Image (cartoon, helix red, strand yellow):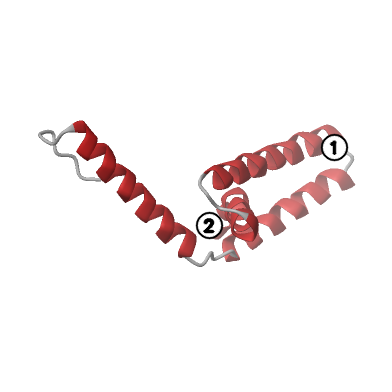
Amino acid sequence: MHFDENEPLSVREERFAAERAESRAVRKAALLDSRGAHIGAAIATIALALLGWYGMLVALGVISGVFLLWFAAALLWAYTDGDRGRHALQRAYNVTFGWGDGF
């Protein structure tokens, strides 16, 4: 966003709103690559299965709850951003487990 200190506030707000709408439209039209999210979900699933296997139920509950809350927050963020349906779920999934792209 370009900032010009001499332009009126109303013009600046209109320009910022148009830029936000344009970036939102580009973001909605983009295809989502979930490869890293699949890797992250697989790692999380294996780690949670191992916690359950070894009887660490408190840790299992805490870590599962963290992932659940993170996914719910990401889904709420995508929904308030204007995404609906499958695209919102994909964005939330990518936000929650996208850290697997680093492996």
Q: Residue 64, position in %: x, y?
A: 76, 41
Q: Quadrant of the N terminus?
A: top left
Nearest the eye: 34 or 84: 84
Res. 93 image quadrant? bottom right
The type of residue carrying mark 2 is Gly
Nearest the eye: 42 or 24: 24
The type of residue carrying mark 1 is Met
Q: Is residue 43 left or right of residue 5?
A: right
Q: Residue 98, position in %: x, y?
A: 57, 54
Question: How many residues crowd mark 2 within 10 Å: few (<14), some (14–19), many (20+)?
Answer: few
SS of the residue at dot 1? loop
SS of the residue at dot 2? helix
Q: Is residue 63 left or right of residue 81?
A: right
Q: Where is mark 1, residue-wise? A: 56
Res. 39 image quadrant? bottom right
Question: How many residues crowd mark 1 within 10 Å: few (<14), some (14–19), many (20+)?
Answer: few
Q: Residue 11, position in %: x, y?
A: 21, 39
> How many circles with numbers are drawn on the protein?
2
Q: Residue 43, position in %: x, y?
A: 69, 55
Q: Residue at x 44, y 58 (%)?
A: 27
Q: Is residue 94 above or below residue 66?
A: below
Q: Is residue 94 above or below residue 62?
A: below
2 or 1: tag closer to the N-terminus: 1
Mark-to-mark CA distance, 2 and 1: 27 Å
Q: Is residue 3 above or below residue 35?
A: above
Q: Quadrant of the C terminus?
A: bottom right
Q: Residue at x 42, y 53 (%)?
A: 24
Nearest the eye: 9 or 70: 9
- Give the residue furthest to the left: 6
Q: Residue at x 62, y 52 (%)?
A: 97
- Callout 2–callout 1 Cβ contact below 8 Å: no
Q: Where is mark 2, residue-wise? A: 102
